[in-house]
Image (spheres, rainbow, N blue to C red):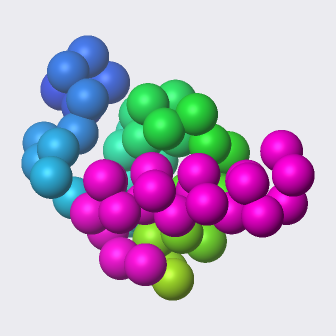
Amino acid sequence: MDHRSIHGPEKRDLIDLQHEQDVRYWSERLRASPAELREAVHIIGATPDRVRDFISRERVLQGR
């Protein structure tokens, strides 16, 4: 069993899109779809705080 499925990602200071378990973890943690998460990481970088802020701003702009 992969330890990530129990404890979350190895590095909580970066979002690793190469591991599906990390994508699931961060999607749930940031309340974003995997597609939203991937888009944010590609645009803003892999730092969770920056990704969270980006997703929040995008939702405000889209009226969600």
Instruction: For the N terminus, give its image quadrant.
Output: top left
Asked if the stretch drawn in magenta spans residue 15, the answer is: no
Q: Is residue 13 left or right of residue 58?
A: left
Identify the residue shown where x is 23% and y is 39%. Answer: 9
Q: Is residue 32 left or right of residue 22?
A: right
Asked if the stretch drawn in magenta spans residue 52, the answer is: yes
Q: Quadrant of residue 37?
A: bottom right
Q: Quadrant of residue 29?
A: top left
Residue 58 lies, with reference to residue 59, above or below; the image says below
Of residues 59 and 11, which is closer to you in this image?
Answer: 59
User: Extreme right residue here?
Assistant: 63
Identify the residue shown where x is 42% and y is 41%. Answer: 26
Residue 6 lies, with reference to residue 45, above or below; the image says above
Of residues 55 and 15, which is closer to you in this image?
Answer: 55
Q: Main secondary structure of the magenta part?
A: helix
Residue 64 lies, with reference to residue 50, above or below; the image says above
Residue 17 at x, y percent in the picture = 41, 62
Q: Is residue 31 left or right of residue 64?
A: left
Q: Find the magenta span and give its range.
A: 44-64
